[in-house]
Amino acid sequence: MAEEPLFTNVLPELVVVSGTASGLGTKIAHLLVASGVRTIGLDLAPAPSELSSELYTHVRGDVSLEETWSDIARSVTAIDPGTLGLVTSAAMLNVGTVLEFDKAAMEKTMSVNFIGTALAFRALLPLMIARGGGPIVAVASIDATFAEQQLAIYAASKGAVRQLTRTVAMDHARQGIRANVLSPGPMLAGLFERHMKSASDPDRFLATRANRQPSGRILDPGEVARAALFLLCDASTALNGAEIVADGGLTTSFDFRTGSEGASV
C-alpha cells in the first residue's frame, strides 16, 4: 500500500480574487492560474495581459458596491465548483494626515478597503459554507498594526480588515471556514509604487525604505503572493484567525542596523 504523502498543497477548484488589475492581486491570480486553478478576478480596471487564460475570468466592478458582489456570486454559482476560496486584495491608498482628508475621502478609503472586504465575505461565505467551507485570505498591511506617518486613514482601514477577518474566522470555523490575514510590508508594486511616486525625491524614498529592510531590498510582490497561496492550500489547515506578516523581517526589530551604524556593543 502506498504511503500517504506527508505534505500536500491542494488548492480550491475556484478562487475569487479582488484587485487583480495590478500589484499583488495580479501576482496571486497569475500563480493560481499557473497552478491550474480556475480564477475569477475583480477590478475596476481591465485585466492585465499576463492573466490571459481559459482559466481566468475577469469581472470589472467596484468592490464597495453590493451589486458587484452579487454579480460575482452569480458567476460562482454558474461555475458550481466543488471547493471555493477567496482572496480580498483590492485596496486604495491616499497619502496625508487626518487634517488633510475631508469626510468624503475618508469614506472612500474605508468603503474600498474595509466595506469592500466585508461585502465580499457576506456574498461568498454562504456559497463556501454550502460547499463544506473553504479558505479566505484577507490582505491587510503591516500598517494595520504599526503606525506610519501620513497613512492614518489607510492604516485605520487595514486595521478594520484585520479584525473583521479574525472575527469571521471565529464565527464560522465550525462551518469549515478558515479566514486568515496576510499583512504585507513594502512591495515593488501597486500602492507602494504610488506612494513612492508621490515623494519629492522618489529615488531617495526607495533607497531609504530599502535600507530599513534587514535584507536591504524591497520585496517583490511574487514573494508575498506565494504566502497567499500557502494560506489557500490544504497545507495550512492549522491556521485560522492567524496573521501572516510578509514583510521580509521589517517589523521584527525596532532597530536592526546598530552594528552597521558604527556601534560595537
Image (cartoon, grey):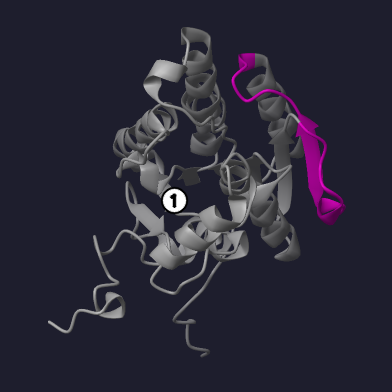
**Where the C terminus falls, by quadrant?**
bottom left
Between 44 and 14, the one lying in front of the other is 44
The reply to whether the magenta stretch includes residue 60 is yes
Q: Residue at x 41, y 35 (%)?
A: 158
Between 108 and 162, the one lying in front of the other is 108
The magenta-colored residue range is 45-66
Q: Residues within 10 Å of mark 1 (few under 14, many from 20)?
A: many
The answer to whether 162 is drawn above or below residue 254 in the figure is: above
Q: Amino acid at mark 1?
A: Leu
Asked which secondary structure carries label 1, the reply is strand
Location of residue 107 in the rendering, given as x and y in whole percent from the top left corner: 49, 14
Location of residue 33 in the rendering, given as x and y in whole percent from the top left corner: 74, 58
Q: Residue at x 52, y 61 (%)?
A: 233
Task: Examine the rendering and report whether any part of residue 230 can be seen.
Answer: no
Q: Residue furthest top?
A: 103
The reply to whether the magenta stretch includes residue 17 is no
Residue designated by label 1:
182
Q: Is residue 39 left or right of residue 247?
A: right
The answer to whether 222 is drawn above or below residue 178 in the figure is: below
